[in-house]
Image (spheres, rainbow, N blue to C red):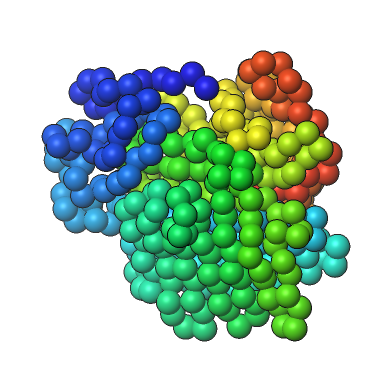
Amino acid sequence: MGEPEAVRAGGVAPPARQSVSRLVDDQGRVRFGIFSEPVEEVDGRQSTLVDEWDRPVSRWRRYWGWNQFEFLGGLSEELIFGCALANVRYAGTVFAYAYFPKRGRMHEFSVQLPLGWGVRLDRRPEDGTSEYRGWRATIRMRAGSQAHTRLLEVDTPGFRIEAELDEHTPPLQPMRICTPAGAAGWVFARKTAGQAVRGSLRLGADLYNLERLGMAGHRDWTAGFMRRETFWNWGCFAARLPGGVAGLNISCGVNETSFTENCFWWNGRLEKLDTVAFDYDRQNLRKPWRMTSFDGRCELDFVPLAQHRERIHLGVVATNFTQLIGRYNGWLCTRGGEQITLRDVWGYAEWHYAKW
């Protein structure tokens, strides 16, 4: 892809192709842009924040304004799973599910945690650890023994997952992006889709080999000082197609100030997309959706077939979250003009409102 320079508050940082080990420099300035090299540390405590009235942001607001989450998913014809750990200071959310499309069966675990008790997420998007150890379940996401692999360990009363997501197969170029959020904040995200998935899922006496299922994976690591009220739509798939491996990450409503995270992967190569419009029935999210990009390189229809929901309404913090599972049809077009046709590809779509 073309490599834009990484822009930071108060000036221009070194080009994104150079190594950016820390997102925040020694003067507390945050680098904005799309980065081709790893960002090893994302630490909001180091950044200089100025509020809407030109005043330094207090330590109290800085602490309570920090939000962070990680999501890992796997998609195949036989089995789909999703798992998320989120800490938004006032509350934490943990969920994991396993969906069996041919049977129409969904197995779910979910818990909401006051003040995020039991959820720990560190500040290293490339190789850090995210984990929950609490009542009835243990979930851990961590770096594998080899570079660019991610391990997921889920132990719930209903099912267990031991999976490795491998970004070497095929070699994936992650989407790493940092954008301003509102007048005082910023958000960093690292995303990939289309990596190989190995390991197993156990449900009762049944054991499923994820590699034999031809599963492809997705990872989303996001942290920052998000808008007090945040809304987004999101679409994603990962699939093995006759011509190669494809992955998608598109959104609307977040990470769209100066840069966007919209992209797809074809055999590991990152293909940047322009802004994407989501068309759906707000009163019935289970009706078909349509997603189209402004540059004409993405035209997709999405038919929801299952869902996972999270709803919290506690005044100071609230979440209305629906993650849909369904099939994508349509096409994507590479920069070189190659058209990738999609027929009944499994993926996710999301409607999410949050007050952090």
Expressed as whole percent of the image width and height from the top left, the position of residue 303 reads 79, 46
Decide if residue 288 is on the left or right side of residue 162.
Answer: right
Expressed as whole percent of the image width and height from the top left, the position of residue 42 reads 30, 46
Expressed as whole percent of the image width and height from the top left, the position of residue 309 reads 62, 62
Comparing 214 with 92, the one in front is 214
Decide if residue 44 is on the left or right side of residue 201.
Answer: left
Q: Quadrant of the C terminus?
A: bottom left
Residue at 14 percent across and 40 percent down: it is: 56
Comparing 339 with 50, the one in front is 339
Expressed as whole percent of the image width and height from the top left, the position of residue 185 reads 31, 40
Comparing 238 with 90, the one in front is 238
81, above or below 185, in the image:
below
- Give residue 52's quadrant in the image: top left
Residue at 43 percent across and 42 percent down: it is: 189
Residue at 51 percent across and 62 percent down: it is: 151
288, above or below 276, in the image:
below
Residue 275 makes an appearance in the image: no
